[in-house]
Amino acid sequence: MSQQTYPKNTWYVAAMSEEVAGSKPLGRKICGESIAFYRSQEDQIAAVLDFCPHRGAALSLGYVEEGLLVCGYHGLKMGADGNTKAMPLQRVKGFPCMKSYAVEERYGFIWVWPGDQSQADKALIPHLEWAINPEWAYGGGLYHINCDYRLMVDNLMDLTHETYVHASSIGQKEIDESPVSTKVEGDQVLTSRYMENIMAPPFWQAALRGNGLADDVPVDRWQICRFTPPSHVMIDVGVAHAGNGGFDAPADKKASSTVVDFITPETETSIWYFWGMARNFKPEDQALTDAIREGQGKIFSEDLEVLERQQDNLLAFPDYDLLKLDIDAGGVQSRRIIDRIIAKEQIGVSSPKAVAPLQTISF
Amino acid sequence: MSQQTYPKNTWYVAAMSEEVAGSKPLGRKICGESIAFYRSQEDQIAAVLDFCPHRGAALSLGYVEEGLLVCGYHGLKMGADGNTKAMPLQRVKGFPCMKSYAVEERYGFIWVWPGDQSQADKALIPHLEWAINPEWAYGGGLYHINCDYRLMVDNLMDLTHETYVHASSIGQKEIDESPVSTKVEGDQVLTSRYMENIMAPPFWQAALRGNGLADDVPVDRWQICRFTPPSHVMIDVGVAHAGNGGFDAPADKKASSTVVDFITPETETSIWYFWGMARNFKPEDQALTDAIREGQGKIFSEDLEVLERQQDNLLAFPDYDLLKLDIDAGGVQSRRIIDRIIAKEQIGVSSPKAVAPLQTISF
Amino acid sequence: MSQQTYPKNTWYVAAMSEEVAGSKPLGRKICGESIAFYRSQEDQIAAVLDFCPHRGAALSLGYVEEGLLVCGYHGLKMGADGNTKAMPLQRVKGFPCMKSYAVEERYGFIWVWPGDQSQADKALIPHLEWAINPEWAYGGGLYHINCDYRLMVDNLMDLTHETYVHASSIGQKEIDESPVSTKVEGDQVLTSRYMENIMAPPFWQAALRGNGLADDVPVDRWQICRFTPPSHVMIDVGVAHAGNGGFDAPADKKASSTVVDFITPETETSIWYFWGMARNFKPEDQALTDAIREGQGKIFSEDLEVLERQQDNLLAFPDYDLLKLDIDAGGVQSRRIIDRIIAKEQIGVSSPKAVAPLQTISF
């Protein structure tokens, strides 16, 4: 009905690796596509339309056997290419080929390309240094939120909201008293804010202590938000004892990390939000990883109601022109890149009915 | 889509005073308008569209600071007139003026005029003697019910239903054996029923005892329902020891009170129902007030399922002509007054799109 | 909107007898009709539109008094023929006649004919020998499922799914390794599968033990599914010690029973599913009846999610041509009979608005 609001010919994070375990598939809707993810082999992930060609059952309710996804209704065995490989007492050669999806497991995540599989290029999956370098540790989680994915991009590209939404942890008055600077580099948007000679808020005090540093002295604080399409936002954040160079201070003078956000549209008005934090200090300290994850999970959950109520309001007033202030520049520029990618994707798309299951033969 | 079923240029009860406390706003939809109510000062109530002009966040998730409603997302400070007064690092003069609402706190309630603010006249708020006279006490509560507000008007203007819906408390066979008399006086409808020389039902036996009177002797009972627009129903109810003049009996021969009903449309098919009871005996007895409120709350909750299922049925059979019997005259006459007021309100209304936020400038 | 998917001029099971008890009516939607079922006398069931002619209240919220259904709102007394019989202080002769339904209590169930009452013939209610013959015992239950009733017909006419959906109880590999045979006899469809010299699965081992037979010896197993319109499926199931004639083995060599399924449309996409099991061994053993019911209830509950997710998928891809394999022949043939009956029913139906309440007079 409405114009498509997200690109489909791109890589999205569909799941955390541990969500698809053993012989149990995972059913998840990504960009309007109902997809069954499963492990055809321990180190091999597959993704097919979550729709059995036989009678339309959800394949994700089934199980994996000998590398095939067995439908839990009548035992049809689906292959990773969308072709039925076997079914008890049936010849399956003439069965229609169903839609399958380019999928890749990398960096502890399962990545899917919900659009045209023939265009999927694994080289386009972003490089994540923190995920492979042993000097880094990572912990994160997943939230489902009923909002347009672009509202979450806006949220993360304008951290002014920390002062209000996260007042008791990472927020502090100095944030919204400090201007931001936004620049666009190709398909990347950078928004940064630097605060000098301030006191660290509770979350960062704890991080300083966790790193063996005094938490009651003035610090320099930074937030460098980096949007890359379709909807990834990586944020370098940290504090350093004041006067040591801030972001560039030596490791023993600062506590820093990268906030990791993969925002994956489920529908036009709902998302799978993969959040986490990567740090390059004490990477072997699992208890610290767990503590940070717990703290971050609590902080990030504060955004849910704000975003869902904002979405309700925007649906009620679809014609209202939202203000575009300097603090919004990060989100505004990110949306321009998104719009350009969608427009490019639309060129040459003949059939608007992109979500029907492939069906080469019916009988 | 459908024709408007409630007047908007009129005063409705939006909340009980205690629902808007301290620096915490209250978000509530009234007549289809999402409104944020807040106290700009301790004795000053304000009401604005629950929509931040910056990015559409719900202002009611924020807080009040120095008399302004601070948006909980990015700190925009909204004034009671719908104009943005401040925002960190921003010049706000050019921000669009949002819709605000005429609002007044009186009698322990917050009254709102959801329509055209320029027409709001505080003198039109009804006078409630029981709310200001120290000889009276009041207790009440609030229910949310999924029904057209006029179904609740019907309900209260025909107390025959007490016999069936409230059989164990205020209902008794003599109610529906006694005819009602209905008269219209200007914009007011009066429906009354008198029952003589009967035994009091349990609720009124308790009230007699509460007033120090014998509960096992014949009584005269009365119900005088008074509708005033848009949807207020005040009901004088009581019993007096038989032969003392009924409604006009001296205070030491009767137990009487006024049932108070403010019925506020949330949408075309849902309401905020403010119910209560005002009494002019033992007004200082708080324990009695609490006991009556608890009893009344339980009795009035019996109407909820009846009304919601009735609403479902009417939606399923929109063309059915409901019967209009003598007992329905109170509701029928009340609806005629409502229809007249709506018709009058529609004259000269050019734009049907009355619920868009005011937006004088966008950029 | 869509074409009607179920016949209405036919008998459906509407309730188990014990669901309509004493003076308490039962409100239940059958084939899109909201119906109030009640006992006008202990041995007499009645069914009327669940809509009070006075103000549209749900009659099923009321109670029965002296054989009449009293509306719980204002005391209107409805008769089994849809005519109002009395109302306090009212003359009711001119009240509109509301829709009533042909209804019959038989075999422990309440049967209703949701269509044209004048065509209802009680002789068309199927004969259920197991329900009246003292050599049989019956136990069963009711599930509400959000799916097209024909998906449940498909389910029961293709027991291949037992291998997958009910793997731990009645499923076994030999089922889907054994071909089925389907034949149509008039309006009846028969699908049968025979398995010889196999080991019994857990449910049938227990049944053998319950019948005093060894459970660790090879058996012959049978499944004979019988569809009759509109949507009844009776399934003869059982195991006999191998080599004794299978289905035709003497009673002391086998454990057998009839799975009973009455599938009643609530709407186009939801059903009341009455399931049960009738057995002709140890009929007096109530503890055994209870144990079987509990076991069957657990097994049959495994179908719910499968069917509801299948329904979701079919709604998302309404144009997909489901495969029609040999194992689906039972369902396919059953649907052909259903389509034929619906087509016949549509002939001569002038008004498409079949669900409005009868209303002969309005005032």
Image: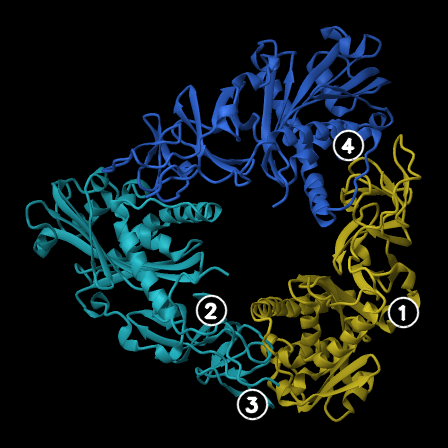
Chain colours: A cyan, B blue, C yellow
Residue located at (83% from left, 79% from top): C187
Relative horizontal placement of residue B270, taking residue B323 as reference (left or right) = left
Q: Give the structural element (helix, strand or loop) at label 2.
A: strand
Give the residue type at disc 2.
Glu
What is the CA distance from the residue labelled 2 to the residue labelled 3? Answer: 24 Å
In the rendering, which numbered label is found on residue A305?
none
Q: Nearer the viewer, residue A90 or A345?
A: A345
**Callout 4: chain:** B
In the rendering, which numbered label is found on residue A33?
2
Relative horizontal placement of residue A113, taking residue B336 as reference (left or right) = left
**Callout 3: chain:** A
Relative horizontal placement of residue C218, taking residue A171 as reference (left or right) = right
Q: Give the structural element (helix, strand or loop) at label 3.
A: loop
Can you say whether B53 is above or below A94 in the image? Answer: above
Count residues near mark 2 (Cα–Cα under 10 Å), then give few for <14, some for 14-19, many for 20+. many
Give the residue type at disc 1.
Leu
In the rendering, which numbered label is found on residue C124?
1
Disc 3 designates what residue?
A: A94
Q: Nearer the viewer, residue A23 or C80?
A: C80
Disc 4 designates what residue?
A: B161
**Residue B216 visible from this viewpoint:** no
Give the residue type at disc 3.
Gly
Can you say whether A187 is above or below B322 in the image? Answer: below
Give the residue type at disc 4.
His
Q: Point out residue C338 in the picture as x, y percentages from the top left corner.
A: 77, 74
Label 1–label 3 contact, CB within 8 A: no
Q: Are marks 1 and 4 on the same chain?
A: no
* Residue farthest along the bottom direction in this orientation: C243
**Residue B248 visible from this viewpoint:** yes
